[in-house]
Amino acid sequence: MNWIDHQTTIEICPPKEFNFQECLVFLGRSDQEILHQIRDGYVYKLIKIKHLLILIKVGCSAQNLLIEFPITPPTMDIREEVASYIWEWFDLDQDISPFYKMAKQDRVLEQLVHSYYGLRIICIPDLFEALTWAIMGQQINLTFAYTLKKRFVECFGESITFAGDTFWLFPIYETIADLDVDTLKKLQFTTRKAEYIIGVARAMTNGGLRKEALLHQQDYHSIQKALMQIRGIGAWSADYVMMKCLHHPSSFPITDVGLHNALKLQLGLQCKPTIDEIRQLASDWQGWEAYAIFYLWRSLYE
């Protein structure tokens, strides 16, 4: 991690393959998003470090990210953890130059990497949030998934109000572990989804499910298998979590509807490609499937 501490602000020096404006486009893809706000070229986000709620304002000057603290600058140790959070949020540890080298030779990706150069996977550092969001999105459209997320966050998350705006934090798993299924059903969660989310929260509360343990495994199939042992997590959800939370560039949620729509659009097809056709198209993406999919998702937000 490469960063500079300015005491009241911090500056992060990302790799050269980074474009904050492209990342901002993806962050702003839905006006229903409740966990961050974008205004005047900045993204505002509430995070929690060592039991403290910290509001951050992230902008960009030239190549570097500038992080301000609109309420009160935190202590040095907290600023360092904020820098680590930002570094992970924008997937800045990942050397994506091999992805670009591959993509420039690929008929599906060639134009996308030119158009969106510097886009990074926008990650979900919190495992509970990543798993819960994956479960929420199962078998419903994205609009209703955001509706469920908003209700969930406003009912069980913490918040602060600053300059007339309210900023929300995703609920912690300890809070959700104490709920019963009927409480979530009142928010229009199905019985199954309510059971799955509470089950994940309880597994994390009792220590049986930890991000560090999953990261330690490294092998793609071992991580996927471990995630799919969680009730409610199938192949798509496992790959989504591996992509967005565990930084695994080989994760490949091949059944993703957004992927299918993007390929249909990019290739000018009359109908969505089959799974076998997608595997054929992706034959050269090995090791970088997650980034290929993320760039295809970005193409849907023109």
Image (cartoon, rainbow, N blue to C red):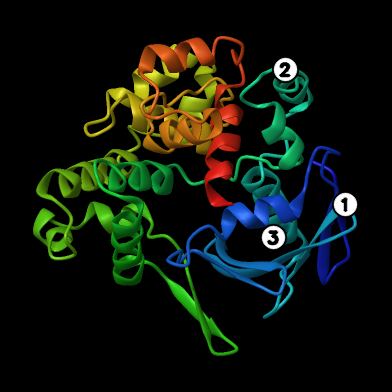
Mark 2 lies on residue: 102
In the rendered structure, which disc, 2 or 3, sits on the residue that comes first in sequence?
Answer: 3
The image shows residue 167 at horizontal and vertical percentages of 51, 74
Between the residue at mark 1 and the residue at mark 2, the CA separation in whole angstroms equals 24 Å
The image shows residue 109 at horizontal and vertical percentages of 65, 27
Please tell me whether residue 204 is drawn above or below residue 34 in the rendered image.
above
In the rendered structure, which disc, 1 or 3, sits on the residue that comes first in sequence?
Answer: 1
Q: Nearer the viewer, residue 230 or 108?
A: 108
In the picture, measured across the screen, residue 227 lies left or right of residue 269, that is left
Mark 3 lies on residue: 78
Query: Could you tell me if residue 123 is visible in this image?
Result: no
In the picture, measured across the screen, residue 43 lies left or right of residue 216, that is right
Quick one: label 2, few (<14), some, or many (20+) residues within 10 Å?
some
Q: Quadrant of residue 154?
A: bottom left
Query: Could you tell me if residue 231 is visible in this image?
Result: yes
At 88% across and 65% down in the image, what residue appears? 6
* Label 2 element class: helix
